[in-house]
Amino acid sequence: MQHPQVVVDMTKLKHNLTYLSQYLQAKGIKVAAVTKVLGAYPELSALYDSIDSIDYLADSRLDNFKHYPKQSTKEKIQLRIPMLSEVDQLVQTVDISLNSQIETIRAINQAARKFNTSHQIILMIDLGDLREGVFETQEIDQYVQEIIQLDSVKLLGLGVNLTCYGAIIPEYSILEQLIQHKQRLEHTFDLTLDIISGGNSSSLYLLDEGGEGIPAGINMLRIGEAFVLGVETAYGKKIDNMHQDVFTLQAEIIEYRDKPSLPIGKVGQDAFGQKPTFVDKGLMKRGIVAIGKQDVDVSNITPRDSRVEIIGASSDHLILDFSQASQDYHLGDTVAFDVSYGSLLNVFTSPYVKKTFIN
Ligand SMILES: *Cc1c(COP(=O)(O)O)cnc(C)c1O
């Protein structure tokens, strides 16, 4: 077996995908399943594509759509605001994109005309998180007025993204503003906006039992993290009936022996230019596993054996304290880690981490 590896439990992932998408479908919410944290890995994209209650497949990078199954019939959404330089590829690759710049929308229209196709856009409104989106109401109206004149672009609806830059919680009153924009625009321009996309995994908490609910009219969510890690992301709470351990990162022990906890000699700077400090805990059972900062942000992984502690890392080595471990470990054993969103992103992007799929 090749290490390090990330092991994906496909049965658990399939359960998460089915469970949450059916739950949202029952509430009248269409689901755009986001594959970017997995680099749209082909085996995983195929699983996402096979789930009937998932309506759309979404990713932030055009290159990732190449990994989707060729025969997929679901509509594809590009999440990141397109680059002016990629509009030709955009209109040939996806059906829908999220947009916030009129110059880019004009370029998309020209590209769609050039390739004899049409393209749908969701206009992003910034409701305070301050990542993407049109900010001023007057500008939103000007944009819509122009977009509806374009011959090869269709305005599918409005969207918002929250809890990304500003960590703003999608409160009921914030999402209501999106509905107010929808109603004003439909009235002013005599049009129908089919899709109101009310955010990502951080909007899920609104649907909790006894919660405020999601404002009527929000009819799409774009869900990435909740599917893979089984958590909502406004408060980081586990979602009942979903698996939080779909992914296991495994690394192999390459050195294992008793050593002191305090380095010996004059302290300079470590491999990353930091001056480390140490606590003297006496003699420790220390091990090195073959994974490092080049593979993963080690502050974002947690040993599944909660009595094993990460004490340091360099590019290719992770040093663990096994003194309190709940089982015996040996050279050549593997150590299992839970991953968070950031480390999942890392390991799926790293060519050094093998991807293994189990059922
Ligand atoms: C990444 C992303 C999502 C998915 O977010 P999760 O928190 O993983 O659910 C949704 N919308 C946009 C615009 C994104 O960039």
Image (cartoon, rainbow, N blue to C red):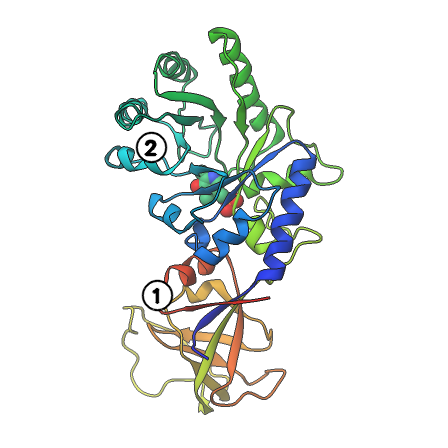
Q: Mark 2 Cα within 10 Å, few/some/many (few <14, many 20+)?
A: many
Q: Secondary structure at mark 1?
A: loop
Whether residue 164 is visible, yes or no, is no
Q: Which one is earlier in the sequence, the residue at label 1 or at label 2?
A: 2
Picture coordinates of residue 307, whole percent (x, y)? 60, 77
Whether residue 12 is visible, yes or no, is yes
* Mark 2 residue CB less than 8 A from any atom of ligand 1: no
Q: Is residue 216 left or right of residue 154?
A: right
- Quarter of the image with the C terminus is bottom right
Q: Is residue 251 left or right of residue 202?
A: left
Picture coordinates of residue 145, whole percent (x, y)? 39, 11
Q: Quadrant of residue 78?
A: top left
| Amino acid type at image mark 1 | Pro
State how far apart marks 1 and 2 are (Cα): 29 Å
The structure residue drawn at horizontal position 23% and vertical position 36%, both measured from the top left corner, is: 85
Q: Quadrant of residue 223?
A: top right
User: Mark 1 or mark 2, which is nearer to you?
Assistant: 2
Q: Who is closer to the viewer here, 119 or 99?
A: 119
Q: Is residue 305 above or below residue 42?
A: below
Q: Is residue 297 above or below residue 19?
A: below
The structure residue drawn at horizontal position 36% and vertical position 69%, both measured from the top left corner, is: 352
Picture coordinates of residue 342, whole percent (x, y)? 45, 56
The residue wearing badge 2 is 91
Label 1 with label 2: CB-CB less than 8 Å: no
Residue 351 disc label: 1
| Amino acid type at image mark 2 | Val
Q: Residue furthest bottom?
A: 258
Q: Residue furthest right?
A: 210
Q: Quadrant of residue 346?
A: bottom left
The structure residue drawn at horizontal position 35% and vertical position 65%, both measured from the top left corner, is: 351
